[in-house]
Amino acid sequence: MKGYGEEILRMEDIVKTFDLGEGKKLVASDHVNISLHKGETLGIVGESGSGKSTLAKILTRLYPMDSGRILIHGKDIAPLKGEELRQARRNIQMVFQDPSTAFNPKQRVKEIICEPLQNYGLIRKGEVEEKAKEMLRLVDLPEDFANRYPNNMSGGQRQRIAIARALVLKPEIIICDEATSALDVSVQKTIIELLDRLQRETHVAYFFICHDLALANMFCDNMIIMQKGKVVERIHDLREAKDPYSKKLLASIFTIEEGKNKVLPDELFQ
C-alpha cells in the first residue's frame, strides 16, 4: 500500500436528516466520521440511498448539515459563510457523473476550464486560451479543443474537460461523484488511468463515490462502506470485510466466470 501525506480532511460526527412530511424523517448521514490524507483515494461505496452523495454535498456545503464538524487542516469550515466559505471551497472541487449538466452549452471549452480562475480573479482575459491549452495537455486532449463546444465531444472527452476544470485551482481534494459510471467500460479504464496519473503528479486526494464495487476495490486505497447513512466499516480491500453487510456487497459482485453457465429463470422471458 502506498504511503500518504498529512491528514487533509476530517469529518466528525456528521448528521443530516431530510423532512419527508407527515412527521417522517430520513436520516441520510448518521454520525459519520471520515478522514482523508494527501495523495489518498478514499472510496465511498454502498447501495443506492446509503448516503454517499449526501456526504459529498455536505462536504462541498451544497447541503447544510444538522450537526458535526468538517475540518480542513484542523480548521472547521462548517460555520463559515460568505467570502470565507467561498475561499474555503477553492480547496475542494467536484467531478460529476454527467459533466454536460455542469457545463454552460454556450461556453467554449477554454471558458469552461478557466471559469473557476476567473471567479477568483486569478487570471487575466488574455491568459485564458494559453491556460486552457495547458490544462487540455494535462488531461491528454488536443489543444485545439480550447475553441470547441463540449456538446460536439464524446462523454469521455467531456469528462476529461471536467477533470481539467476541477484541477485548474490546484485543490487538495477532488470529489468524484460516480465520475465514470455513465461511460463505456473501455472509456472508464482510460479515465481511471488518467486520475491515477494526475494523483501521482499532483498528490491530490480523491473522495471517490462509486457503486461499482470491483472498480472501487481496484482503484481506491481505502474504502468506507455505507448503509442507510451509517459507516459500517473502513477497509483496505473488500476481501477484508468483516461486517455482514460488507460481505453481502462482496457476494453481489458478478464475475465473468460466474456468468458462463448462468441459467436465467423462465419468468424473465414471459
Image (cartoon, rainbow, N blue to C red):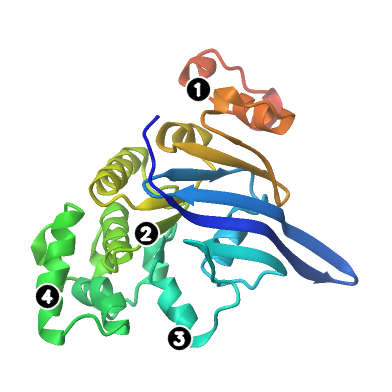
**SS class, disc 1:** loop
- The answer for how far apart the CA atoms under marks 1 and 3 are is 49 Å
Under tag 4, what secondary structure?
helix
Q: CA distance from mark 3 to mark 2?
A: 19 Å
Is residue 53 placed above or below 110 in the rendered structure?
Answer: above
Residue tagged 3:
83
CA neighbours of label 4 inside 10 A, class few (<14), some (14 to 19), many (20+): some
Which mark is drawn over residue 129? 4
Rendered image: mark on residue 255: 1
Instruction: Check if mark 4's residue and mark 3's residue have beta carbons within 8 Å.
Output: no
Closer to the eye: label 1 or 2:
2
Residue 149, image x, y percentages: 22, 71
Sooner in the amino-acid sequence: mark 1 or mark 4: 4
Q: Residues within 10 Å of mark 3 (few under 14, many from 20)?
A: few
Three-letter amino acid code at the position of disc 2: Glu
Residue 182 appears in the figure: no
Question: Which residue bears the numbered disc 2?
Answer: 172
Q: Earlier in the sequence, mark 1 or mark 2?
A: 2
Residue at (25%, 70%) from the top-left corner? 113
Determine the CA span between mark 1 and mark 2. 35 Å
Locate residue 173: give its quadrant: bottom left
State if disc 4 and disc 1 touch (CB < 8 Å): no
> Residue placed farthest to the top in the image?
261
Q: Rounded to the nearest whole Å, what is the CA distance between mark 2 and mark 4?
A: 24 Å
First along the sequence among labels 4 and 3: 3
The answer to whether one can see residue 159 in this image is yes
Q: Along the horizontal axis of the image, is 157 left or right of 221?
A: left
Query: What amino acid is found at the position of numbered circle 3 in the picture?
Result: Glu
